[in-house]
Image (cartoon, rainbow, N blue to C red):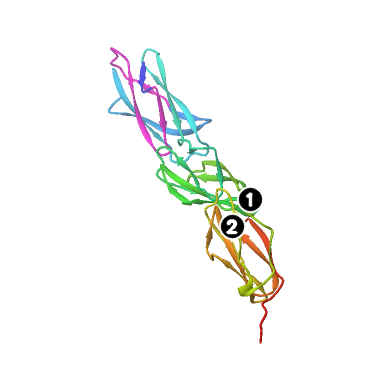
Amino acid sequence: ITTTPPALSLLPGGSGTFTVAEKNYNQSFSLGTCTSSGKTLATVSFLGGNRGPSATVKVSAAASLSHLPGACTIAIGDQYGQTAGESVTIGYPPLTVSTPSLMLTGNGAGSFTVSEGQYSGNFTVGTCESNSRTIATAAPSVVPGPSGLVTVTPASAGSCNLSVTDSHGQSASVAVSVVLSPLTVSASSVQFPAAGAAAIPQTLTLAEANDSGSFNVTPCVAGSTPLAQILPGSISGPSALLTISALLVGTCNVMVSDTLGQSTTFAISITTGTINLQ
């Protein structure tokens, strides 16, 4: 007795067929059940009769099983005592991701593909956090099956596990690490011996390798009074030149920050004001 194919893999609620054959045999075949630990995993029946030399058997998997994957062997027999077995596995294809890890630098994004054969539902993409701090963002957060691309964008330095799940309890994860180059300023302080028209503008360089995002520069003020003008107002990495012009006598601390949570400061000191002749 032969069976073709010799094994079936079915989704829960799905069905499949196999052929049982025995050369020169014109009697009926007997058909066993598909059970495991006393539980029925699938119903089994002949299609169009059970007599040889060949017959078709339909296997219909249960729609809901408490443990997946489930497996059974269906016994087939003839009138002479010969037997054969058809192996049946019921479960879902594995949920996979295209890479186990992503290393991100600066504000450069990375991506991975999530896949699951024969899956038409949605994948849910989790958050990438460490100690309640967002390490990276993933988009989209819902991905239609059977496969799709997820883009991961750095938010701050650190590492996390980004989990992806399907609608029937399977999951996979990608280990994400975000490594940032330090945000630097070319001098920790700038000193002006004069203010106003008598002051010569000075420059500083801001730099952060691999970061093409924007930098934010706080104003140099005493209370609400501007002490120095810092240009340009809109700055992007990985490096930028600041031009500082002294306006009034005083001191201030200026903070520069990136979009990834890093910051640095420099001081501005203006020691002498302009002389007014009357």
Pick the residue in front: 260 or 42: 260
Residue, x 52% and y 31% (percent of image)? 38
Q: CA distance from mark 2 to mark 1?
A: 10 Å
**Magenta residues, as a range?**
6-32
Could you tell whether 84 is left or right of 224 in the image?
left
Q: Which residue corresponds to mark 2?
A: 258
Residue 242 lies, in percent from the top left, at 58, 61
Q: Which residue corresponds to mark 1?
A: 182
Residue, x 31% and y 26% (percent of image)? 56
In the image, is residue 209 part of the stretch drawn in magenta? Answer: no
Q: Secondary structure at mark 2?
A: loop
Residue 108 lies, in percent from the top left, at 52, 48
For disc 1, the neighbor class at 10 Å (few under 14, some 14 to 19, many from 20) is few
Q: Earlier in the sequence, mark 2 or mark 1?
A: 1
- What amino acid is labelled 2 in the image? Asp
Q: In which quadrant of the rendered view does residue 231 lie?
A: bottom right
Identify the image quadrant of the N terminus.
Answer: top left
Q: Secondary structure at mark 1?
A: loop
Q: Is residue 22 above or below residue 228?
A: above
Residue, x 46% and y 41% (percent of image)? 113
Could you tell whether 81 is left or right of 126 in the image?
left
Could you tell whether 239 is left or right of 49 in the image?
right
Q: Is residue 103 above or below residue 214?
A: above
Identify the image quadrant of the C terminus.
Answer: bottom right
Residue 165 lies, in percent from the top left, at 51, 45
For disc 2, the neighbor class at 10 Å (few under 14, some 14 to 19, many from 20) is many
